[in-house]
Amino acid sequence: MSDNIPLEIQAEIIKRIPVKSLLQFRSVSKAWKSLIDSSDFINRYSSQQQHLLVRYNHRQIFPFSERKYVSIVDDETFPHQRVSLTHPAFVNMLRSHRIIGNSHGLLCLYGCYGLETTMAVVWNVSIRKAIAVVVPNVANGVYTTFVGFGVCPATNDPKIVKITDIIHWEDVESIPDSIPWQVEVFTLSTGAWRSPYNNLPRTSIQFGSSQVVVEGFCYWLATDRSIVDAGFEGYNRIISFHLTSEEFREVNLPDRLVYDGCFDNLNIANLRESLVVLEQDARENVCYVWSMKDGVSVSFTKLYTIYSPNATLLRVLEFRKNGEPLIEIEDIDDDRIDIPSLLAVYKPKSKHISNIGINGAGSFYVYSYMETLLLLDQQEFTIFDKGKSYIARRRAEIRSLLKHISMVQNINQ
C-alpha cells in the first residue's frame, strides 16, 4: 500500500480484511505489524464473514472415535466452504472436557488436567491461539461447580464465571456453616479471580449447564427451588449475568415452560442477537422456538415449530446467520444399535430439511462466530493461575509446567 496514504486510513482499510490475510500482512512491514498487534486495532477489528464451528466425533472403529473440528463459511455457498481445524495443545491435554460457551469469536472449554488441576481453555479459532486458566476451589462432595464464559462488550475483556452451589438444596440445613453458593469471576486483563458483590442471585437458585451469550449478557437455564409441606418444588427460570456490570438478574419464562423445575426438554440459544428458548417434545418429534423480544422477559413469543416427519429430531444446535436452525437428526428407519446422527439445516418457511454431509454419532456442538483478533496479543502457551501467568517456551514444556502448578496447589492446600 502506498506510503502516501496516512496510516490511519490504511488501518481503516485493512481492518476489513479476513484474519488469514491480515496475519500474513504483519510480515509486510514493521509499521503494519505494530499496527495490527496493537490493542486498539485488536479491539476495533471486525470481519463481516460469518462462520460455523462444528465439533463432532467421527466414528472409525467401534468403540473408538476421533473428535474433529470443522469451520464452515456461513454465506450463500454454505455448506461447501469448510476447513478442518487442529486442536490447540491445551485442548488435547484436557481430560473429559466439555464446551461451556462462546462469545466474540472465542470458544471456552472446561475440563481436568491429571487428577488435581481443573482448567478452562479459551480458544480463538480464527488465529489458532489459545490460553489456559486454572480454575481454583472446584467443589466436590455435596457441592458442585458450574462455569460460564463471555466477553465484556465494553472492554473486549474475556471473563470466566465460576458458580458453586449445593447439589441437593434440601441438604443446606444438614450441612453446618454451609454457604449455598459462591461466585468468582476471572478477567483476562488482570489474570486474576475475584468475587463480585452486585445483586447476586437468591440462594434458592440452582444453575444448569446450558449457557448462551446475547448482547452482553450470559444466560443460563436454572431452577428456583423451595420446600413446601416437606416436599420439594422447583420452577424453571433463566438467570442472566451482565458482563459489564457483573450483576445477576432473573428472567421469567412463558407459563407453559415454568412448571416442574425440570428443564431436560429445554435449551437456550442466540438467534440474531435475540435470546430464544427451545422446547423439545420428543413424543411429537417437534421443537418449539420461543423468542424474547428486546430483552423483556414478558414478551416471549413462539416463532415457529420445527417438524421432522422423516427423521428423529434429537436437538436444535445453533442458528445460521440467516436464521435457519441447524439440527441433529437420526434415521427413523435405521434399526442398528449404533446409529450415526446427522447434521442438517431446517428451513422454517418450506419446512424442508437438508443434510449437510457430516455424521457425528450423537456428539455435535455447533456455534456461530465472526472472526476476531482477541488473544493475538497473548503469548503462546500462556497459563494463568492465582493472578500469575506462566509461559511455556515450547509445546513440550506445557506438561511439565502444569505438573509444577498442580504440585504448588497441593502444597498450598
Image (tube, rainbow, N blue to C red):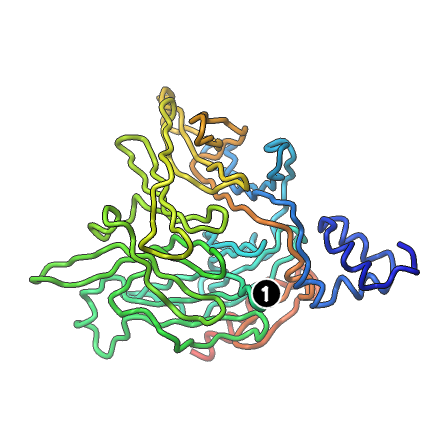
> Is residue 394 placed above or below 408 in the rendered structure?
above
Rendered view: 90 above or below 355: below
Q: Residue at x 22, y 56 (%)?
A: 235
Residue 99 location (% of width, % of height): 48, 52
Task: Identify the image quadrant of the N terminus.
Answer: bottom right
> What residue is rendered at 86% in x and 56% in y?
28
Dividing the picture into quadrants, the one containing residue 36 is: bottom right
Residue at 56% over, 63% down: 132
Residue 305 visible at all: yes
- Left/right of residue 30 with respect to residue 284 in the rendered view: right
Residue placed farthest to the top in the image?
333
Q: Residues within 10 Å of mark 1 (few under 14, many from 20)?
A: some
Horizontal side, residue 155 vs residue 254: left or right = right
Rendered view: 295 above or below 265: below
Q: Quadrant of the C terminus?
A: bottom left
Image-based side of 214 in relation to 3, left or right: left
Tag 1 residue: 156
Could you tell me if residue 114 is visible in this image? no
Left or right of 126, for residue 174: left
Where residue 133 sits: x, y (%)? Answer: 54, 66
